[in-house]
Image: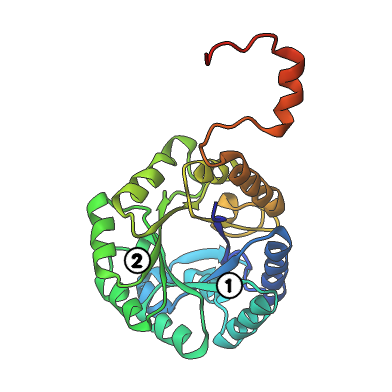
Amino acid sequence: MTETYIIAEIGINHNGSLDLAKELIRDAHAAGADAVKFQKRTLELVYTPEELDKHRESPWGTTNRQQKEGLEFSIEKYKELETYTKFLDMDFIVSCWDTDSVKVIEEHLDVSYHKVASALATDREFLQSLNHTKKPVILSTGMCTSEQVAAAIDILDNTEYVLACTSTYPTYAEEINLRYITTLANKYPTLKAGFSNHYSGHDACVGAVAHGARCIEFHVTKDRTMYGSDQAASIEKVKELISAIRNMEKMLGDGVKRVYESENPIAKKLRKVDDTTR
C-alpha cells in the first residue's frame, strides 16, 4: 500500500515567530510528516480597508490590520523556512490567498505544491493563476457544493490531490463526513482523494485513512490554548497522530483472506475438526 502523504500545517500558528515556526517544523519532522505548510496573504487584496481597520485586540495592537501584519512573514523569512524545511528532507508548501502572493512565492521560492484553501476554491482568476505556475495542486473542498468542486477541478490543470474538508474550527464530529473521501475517489479516479482536518482529536485523520485517504493535512501547534484562530482546531501530539495513521495503514491490509503464520499454532491447539471443505 502507498503511504499516505502527511502534511503538517503550521499555517499561522507560528504567531509571527520565526523560532516557533522552526520548532514546529522540527516537531513535524521528528513525528514523520512528509511536508509542512504555511500561508501567504497580501492583506490589501484579501481584506477590505474597513475590515482591516476594525477593532481587534491582539499581541500586536488593537486593529485587524495590526493583528494580520503581525502574523505575516516577509519573503526573506519564507526563504529561510523553505531552506530549513528542505534541509530536513521535507516538502515545503504554501497556501496563497491571492494572485499577488502566488507571484511572490513563485518568484522567490520553489514550493512542492500550491494549495487551494477552501475559501479560494470558487475564485476563477486565482485558480487560473495557479495553472501558470505548472506546479501540482492540492485542492480543499470546505464550504463548497459538489458543483463548485467540479468547477474548480475543471478550471485547474494540475490537481493532484482533492481533499474532503469541513471549514469550521474545530469541526463537529457529525459534520466531518469521512465517507465523502470515497465519493471523491469514485468521482475523480484520476485524482488522489484525501482529507483536510479541522477536528481537534486524532479520530478523524485515522478514520480518513481507513476510508482510503491518500493525503492527510492537519494543523499543528505547541499548545492549543495559545493565541490564534486556528489553535483550537490543531493537533498538539503530532507524533502520536502520525504513528496512529501509519498503524492504520498496516491494519487495512490488502483485503485478501489468508491464514497467517501466527495463527497456525493456535489452530493446531484449538481446532479439533476441519471437514468443511470436503
Q: Position of residue 56 (x, y in %)?
A: 51, 64
* Picture quadrant where residue 221 is located: bottom right
* Picture quadrant where residue 11 is located: bottom right
Please tell me whether mark 2 sits on a helix, a strand or a loop.
helix
Q: Position of residue 49 (x, y in %)?
A: 37, 75
Pointer 2: residues within 10 angstroms few (<14), some, or many (20+)? many
Decide: marks 2, 1 in contact (CB < 8 A)? no
Q: Which amino acid lies under the numbered mark 1 shown in the image of this protein?
A: Asp
Pointer 1: residues within 10 angstroms few (<14), some, or many (20+)? some
Query: Is residue 201 at all visible to an observer of this figure?
Result: no
Q: Residue at x 56, y 50 (%)?
A: 233
Task: Report the disc number at residue 120.
Answer: 2
Task: Report the disc number at residue 91.
Answer: 1
Please tell me whether mark 1 sits on a helix, a strand or a loop.
strand
State left or right for residue 19 relative to residue 81: right
Q: Earlier in the sequence, mark 2 or mark 1?
A: 1
